[in-house]
Amino acid sequence: MQGRNISDIIEAYLKQILAESERVEIKRSEIAALFNCVPSQINYVIKTRFTIQRGYLVQSKRGGGGYIRIEKVKLLDDRDMLDTMIQLIGEQINQRDALALVQKLYDDRIIGRKEANLILAATSHETLAVADREFEAQLRAHILIGILNHLRYERE
Amino acid sequence: MQGRNISDIIEAYLKQILAESERVEIKRSEIAALFNCVPSQINYVIKTRFTIQRGYLVQSKRGGGGYIRIEKVKLLDDRDMLDTMIQLIGEQINQRDALALVQKLYDDRIIGRKEANLILAATSHETLAVADREFEAQLRAHILIGILNHLRYERE
DNA sequence: TTAACTTTGACTAATATTGACTATTATTAT
DNA sequence: ATAATAATAGTCAATATTAGTCAAAGTTAA
């Protein structure tokens, strides 16, 4: 955690700002210049230290007036279960198992009926039948994991 | 959504007016002068931020007394709106346009905040980056259409 | 020693800005 | 009326301004 390397120092710098406000917005090149490193190092720091698992949400925009914004989010209590589910899904999942998983999310009141149906629509065979079965199962896994990651935190 | 560049500022300016009236009519050169930019930048702002997908209709006239008019469109009922959106999505859609579309669904109260965020999670670049960009956009279109079709009968 | 972590930079992608050229409409002169 | 001119807005491609990706090379810790 100490500043043994540039990444740690940049991490500390950003977290210091985040200790006092809910979000920090930076210009990648400016931070890179400030810490004498290449711009892509900022991406590395964000990717390794400001993940959703740790309670950070990152958004960015390129082009003129571009920025990187890091936001603290409130993680919910269910995240252990979500982690377990993500583990279980692995690389691929078929529709039947996906249904069971969504059912469990519903039974545990992590999602409501409308949301459950939405997820089922997004991961149904009808929607995802774009190639072979295996690829479809991989896609389903990707989408479900993306959704589960978004269920980790509360939004304003 | 704040104004970090001229385009964002102009967008905000126009939307502020549109928040209070159904339409706004401008003289391109005047707005350009007001914001210290070239006139064609106004076209850029309109093209990227006031699309039909986002619920705006734009009309204009050249020559003396010319103008650009931006109007908020009123969609008939939800079913028509869903059909229209499916049409607009077509074979593929990028994340930006998808975001605008979900925003419109939310603004028109067809979906709630949680559902909107779920859809965004399911169709984000992070979730769908499994192959090349074109395929990703096709996938996004498939999923969105699947969800929209689901919303169609979920409501009845 | 080796596996994990960090640093770097070349290449890519997204978005914004600008201006030269074109198209359309209104007004004025003939 | 018609033609010339003025007053608009539109298009498009070049350039500028950001951030993202990825893999090679370097460093550190187990």
Image: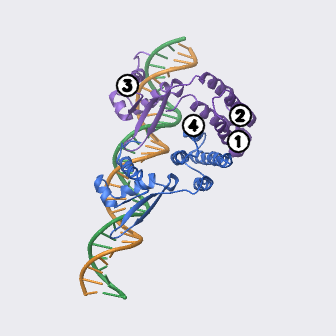
Chain colours: A purple, B blue, C orange, D green
Q: What residue sits right under mark 4 in the picture? A: B114
Disc 3 residue crowd, few under 14, some 14–19, many 20+, Cα 10 Å: few
Q: CA distance from mark 1 to mark 3?
A: 43 Å
Q: What residue sits right under mark 2 in the picture? A: A98
Residue depth check, mark 4 versus mark 2: number of the one nearer the observer: 4
Disc 2 residue crowd, few under 14, some 14–19, many 20+, Cα 10 Å: many
Element type where label 3 sits in the image = helix
Q: CA distance from mark 4 to mark 1?
A: 20 Å
The quadrant in which residue A97 appears is top right
In this rendering, do the residues under marks 1 and 3 share a single chain?
Answer: yes
Q: Quadrant of the N terminus of chain B?
A: top left
In this rendering, do the residues under marks 4 and 2 share a single chain?
Answer: no
Q: Earlier in the sequence, mark 1 or mark 2?
A: 2
Return the chain for callout 3.
A
Disc 4 residue crowd, few under 14, some 14–19, many 20+, Cα 10 Å: some
Residue at screen point 65% across, 23% down: A84
Element type where label 2 sits in the image = helix
The quadrant in which residue B88 appears is bottom right
